[in-house]
Image (tube, helix red, strand yellow):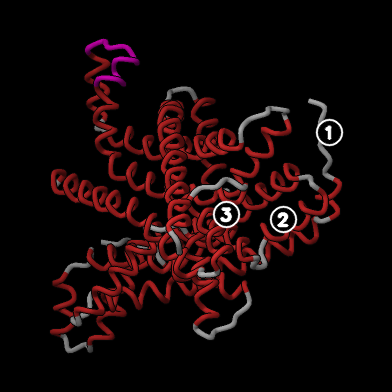
Amino acid sequence: MDYKLDFGPVIEGFPNLLWGCLGTLGLAMSGMTLAIAIGIGGVVLRDSRIKPLRWLTMAFVEVIRNTPFLVQIYFIFFALPLAGILLNPTITAVIALGLNGGAYAIEIIRGGVQSINKGQIEAGLALGLRKPVVFRTIVLKPALRAIYPSLVSQFVLLTLTTSIASAVSAYELTSVAKRIESDSFRSFEVYGTITLLYLAMSWLVMLILNSIGSRYFNYPIK
Amino acid sequence: MGKGEFLFLLKGLQWTIALSAVGFICGMVTGLGVALLRTSRFRFLKRSAAGYIAVFQGTPLLMQLFVVYYGLALYGLKLDAWVAIAIGFTLHASAYLGEIWRGAIEAVPRGQMEAARALSLSYFWRMKDVVLPQALRISLPATIGFLVQLIKGTSLAAFVGFTELSRAGSMVSNQIFKPLLVFGIVGLMYFAICWPLSIYGSRLERKFAAAAR
């Protein structure tokens, strides 16, 4: 092996890489927030009384879950401008991540909602609570508690998925690394380093989400 | 889109399927090893396997491909691009399948293992004839779920210039300037492979859940 490893370009570009990490974390956080919103809204639509809404939500979930994120983000990237919506790539990536994560969140949250005892809902209604209140306090909150661990692993996955957003050159770690790589041709050193950065970030995200979980969702489910 | 472009996409689809198959099959062989190490009695082996799994589950698949792809080149291994990528997917699959099967092995009731030991079966036969057949059955839905994930993941081979379905789609789209049509068709092709698998997986899951009740 006559190749000599040279981390010079990586060290030189390290501040930029750290900014890239912030970009990745920001992308992941915004994606998660959107995903949660879509997830909760989707569950309501998925079990609504209006049939076409139910079918549309189901179709959305199945299409998203059975096609690659890369194809989804390309599709959205080209579809939005055609619809007259001009956004920068990073916002486009947030939308794609939100839609993708949202489809998985719908399935996960629905599993939690289905685990709620029907009798409790009926009891709530019998006590004269209004439907939205019943949904929020008797269905959603306990359901979120039950599914929190699955949501955490889905969101860690979402954090890792942000690297694919480099395909539309959103601002995040992989795009920053690509730029350093194309200036220096030190592919292995650059990508090896950011792999470790990703590892650190996924642990950080897991740590934060788990501590939120033990703060707010850590009481017995049944 | 003409016939030529469509045939080009089909060729890409062929590579996607080939890459998924190679990654999954080689990943199953190595993944079984990872699962056995992860459930072994020796602390060192257990910890190493756990570390291996944690690294692969904590980094993006794209980075794993990059590191393997450029890393193998450093060692002067003159491999075909597609062999390097297949190695990347194999390692990725081995970690995920290893973790899925660890869970399944641990889900087999302990009494089974103890009974086999009481019959003085050796480790090999205990695993092969008693534990693994039950564990594989338990793990089937999750294993199929991972296969779907792997098929979708092969789209990332496009980043290192391998012409599978997604990259074929980008190329055609750049040629004929109809990105929505092309990526719509590409998406449909992925969907056509992944959806039946997903349905089969969730059907098995429901069946097993009903049987366990």
Q: Nearer the viewer, mark 1 or mark 3?
A: 1
Magenta-tinted stretch: B119-129
> Which residue: 74% across, 48% down?
A190
Of the numbered discs 2 and 3, the one sitting upstream in the chain is 2
Q: Chain of mark 1?
A: A
At label 2, counting other C-alpha atoms closer than 10 Å, the crowd grade (few under 14, some 14-19, many 20 or more) is some
Residue B129 shown left or right of residue A97 in the figure: left
Magenta run includes residue B120: yes
Q: Quadrant of residue B41?
A: top left
Distance (Cα) linking label 1 and label 3: 30 Å
At label 1, the amino acid type is Lys
Amino acid carrying label 2: it is: Lys
Quarter-of-image position of residue A23: bottom right
Residue B135: x %, y % from top left: 28, 32
Magenta part mainly helix, strand or loop? Answer: helix
List the residue tagged with mark 2.
Answer: A178
* Residue that numbered label 1 is attached to: A4
- Can residue A97 be seen here? The reply is no
Residue B112, how many percent across, how many down?
23, 25
Q: Chain of mark 2?
A: A
Alpha carbon separation for disc pair 2 and 1: 20 Å
